[in-house]
């Protein structure tokens, strides 16, 4: 009887183990990104996720969709990938509040959700993986403050603050970090703007109005990403302001790196999206296996892993971007930027 029971137990265990393997092998995973205003999703996040999934689960199917800043479209895409059999959905939400309902729908059907880059505050996902967005906001603001002080800009001078989308919880975290970085700086915020859909033209339009309003009182701009920062820089140039006051950024886009090299943008954040994408793939495979991924920290009651990025200025752009192989000189140091690259030692 004992032998028979042991055989039955062993058989049951083998069935569970084979079921776990089958749950992983051949499974469908969806990767849903929020917009195309930032080039990172097409060029870095999705390729990084797809490559890591290919290493970890070669037979797994990866479905990629981009909502193009349309929350209703993202809901349709979310429902569609679940109907196509996705067992794990990696979701970077267009609207962080609206995404709570998507998490609830998925979890009610046994589908796991990994919140990606942008958190979902109102409903705990199965995991959250991102860079430390609040830390990013603080870092770019502090870097700007340090630069203003180093160049003798007197206390009491004014700066502009350009935030990201009001529907993006990650933008809210970046905003909070900026507030913290400016709070005891001695500089005052002349005006602040939440940029709908992170759209650079909207940031440019707003900045143009503030330049008309405040003129030379503007000694710096804390912009939440490279797109909004680039919009501000374009507004200063259109207004004939030369030199452009120091403007921050975030994402280390090619355009921003070139602006730093030319001296038009002060800083950005180097956060190779492939790092977060690879982490999301690892977590997705663990969830497919029925495992519980380790929480490095917790945010909004969600087990999380947050990566710490690096601030990039002209002083360290060679070491952080080119020496680390994040970008190649021949892709950045083209045309009018070649002289700046030589000056910074990027090109010989």
Image (cartoon, helix red, strand yellow):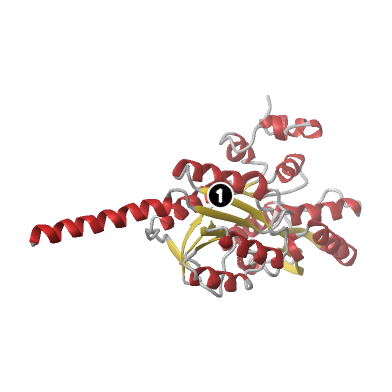
Where residue 345 sits, quadrant-wise, is: top right
User: Residue 164's x, y, as percent?
Assistant: 70, 63
In the image, taking residue 3 as reference, residue 232 lies left or right, namely right
Kind of element beneath mark 1:
strand
Q: Is residue 20 left or right of residue 276?
A: left
* Location of the N terminus (image quadrant): bottom left
**Residue 61: % across, % down:** 53, 48
Figure quadrant of residue 181: bottom right
Q: What x and y, as percent, mark residue 243?
A: 83, 48
Residue 314 appears in view? yes
Q: Residue sitting at 61 percent across and 35 percent down? A: 322
Taking depth in this image into account, of 247 and 288 the one nearest to the observer is: 288
Residue sitting nearer the eye, 55 or 333: 55
Residue, disc 1 = 62
Q: Is residue 297 above or below residue 280?
A: below
Q: Residue 207 in the image: x percent, y percent? A: 83, 61
């Amino acid at each position: 009887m004992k032998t028979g029971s042991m055989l039955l137990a062993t058989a049951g265990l083998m069935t569970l183990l084979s079921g776990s393997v089958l749950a992983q092998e051949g499974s469908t995973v969806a990767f849903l990104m929020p917009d195309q205003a930032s080039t990172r999703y097409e060029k870095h996040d999705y390729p990084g996720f797809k490559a890591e999934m290919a290493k970890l689960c070669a037979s797994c199917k990866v479905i990629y969709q981009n909502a193009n800043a349309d929350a209703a479209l993202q809901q349709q895409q979310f429902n569609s990938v679940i109907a196509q059999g996705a067992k794990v959905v990696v979701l970077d939400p267009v609207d962080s509040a609206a995404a709570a309902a998507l998490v609830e729908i998925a979890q009610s059907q046994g589908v796991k959700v990994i919140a990606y880059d942008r958190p979902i505050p109102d409903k705990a996902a199965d995991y959250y993986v991102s860079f430390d967005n609040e830390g990013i906001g603080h870092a770019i603001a502090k870097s700007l403050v340090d630069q203003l002080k180093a160049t003798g800009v007197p206390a009491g001078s004014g700066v502009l603050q350009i935030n990201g989308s009001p529907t993006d919880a990650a933008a809210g975290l970046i905003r909070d970090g900026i507030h913290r970085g400016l709070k005891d700086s001695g500089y005052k915020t002349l005006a602040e703007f939440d940029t709908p859909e992170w759209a650079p033209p909207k940031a440019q339009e707003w900045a143009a109005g503030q330049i008309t309003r405040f003129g030379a009182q503007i000694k710096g701009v804390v912009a939440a990403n490279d797109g909004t920062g680039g919009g501000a820089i374009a507004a200063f140039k259109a207004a004939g302001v030369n030199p452009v006051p120091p403007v921050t950024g975030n994402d280390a886009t090619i355009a921003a790196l070139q602006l730093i090299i030319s001296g038009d943008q002060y800083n950005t954040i180097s956060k190779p999206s492939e790092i977060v994408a690879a982490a999301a793939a690892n977590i997705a495979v663990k969830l497919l296996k029925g495992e519980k991924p380790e929480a490095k920290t917790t945010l909004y009651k969600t087990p999380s892993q947050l990566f710490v990025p690096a601030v990039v200025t002209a002083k360290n752009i060679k070491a952080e971007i080119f020496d680390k192989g994040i970008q190649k000189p021949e892709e950045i140091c083209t045309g009018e930027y070649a002289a700046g690259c030589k000056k910074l030692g990027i090109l010989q």
